Image (cartoon, rainbow, N blue to C red):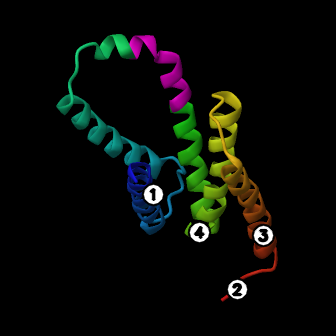
């Protein structure tokens, strides 16, 4: 149950983020909203980090600088991709992102890179995720619906 609650918390935060982006006025600078949102996020993380002070924080950062840089590149790609997706095609396109994330993150990173195990049910879910992408893409090609 705890993983579900953590995932629900993250999904709710993502929905709030998408609402913020979609409700903002368009800008000629595609990076402006993201910079301000990431800065606000950074301030929240700074406050949480200072409140959760532990010994060895600097040593941790020094030992994990490469992984931190990789994570930063991933955040940039994610947020810029969100900007392009949502401003160009709308928030409903999140379904496509979400299913692609299942495949790239769970399968690509989890299974292929870190060798995390999957059972038959989880493999079936991956196949259904791939089918969902195909159906979504086909459905979008038919034009607007309701």
* Range covered by the magenta-colored residues: 61-71
Q: Which residue is mark 2?
A: 145
Question: What secondary structure is found at the residue carrying circle 4?
Answer: loop
The first of marks 2 and 3 along the sequence is 3
Q: Which residue is mark 3?
A: 135
Rendered image: mark on residue 11: 1
The first of marks 4 and 3 along the sequence is 4
Residue ranking furthest to the bottom? 146
Corner quadrant of residue 25? bottom left
In percent of width and height, residue 137 lies at 78, 67
Q: Do the CB atoms of the residues marked 2 and 3 lie less than 8 Å apart?
A: no
Residue ranking furthest to the left? 51
Q: Quadrant of the N terminus?
A: bottom left
Q: Which residue is mark 4?
A: 90
- The front one of 95 and 18 is 95
In percent of width and height, residue 100 lies at 68, 52
Query: Where 22 sits versus 114, above or below?
Result: below
Question: What secondary structure is found at the residue carrying circle 1?
Answer: helix
Q: Residue at (43%, 49%) from the top-left corner?
A: 3
Q: Do the CB atoms of the residues marked 1 and 3 lie less than 8 Å apart?
A: no
| Residue 64 in magenta stretch | yes
The first of marks 1 and 4 along the sequence is 1
Q: CA distance from mark 1 to mark 4?
A: 17 Å
The first of marks 4 and 2 along the sequence is 4
In screen coordinates, is 143 left or right of 7?
right
């Amino acid at each position: 149950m705890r993983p579900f609650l953590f995932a629900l918390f993250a999904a709710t935060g993502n929905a709030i983020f998408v609402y913020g982006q979609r409700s903002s006025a368009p800008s000629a600078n595609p990076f402006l909203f993201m910079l301000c949102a990431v800065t606000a996020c950074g301030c929240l993380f700074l406050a949480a980090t200072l409140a959760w002070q532990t010994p060895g924080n600097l040593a941790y950062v020094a030992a994990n600088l490469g992984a931190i840089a990789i994570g930063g590149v991933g955040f940039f790609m994610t947020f810029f991709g969100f900007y392009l997706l949502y401003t160009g095609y709308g928030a409903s396109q999140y379904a496509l992102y979400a299913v692609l994330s299942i495949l790239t993150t769970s399968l690509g990173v989890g299974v292929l890179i870190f060798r995390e195990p999957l059972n038959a049910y989880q493999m079936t879910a991956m196949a259904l995720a791939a089918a969902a992408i195909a159906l979504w893409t086909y459905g979008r090609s038919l034009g607007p619906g309701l």
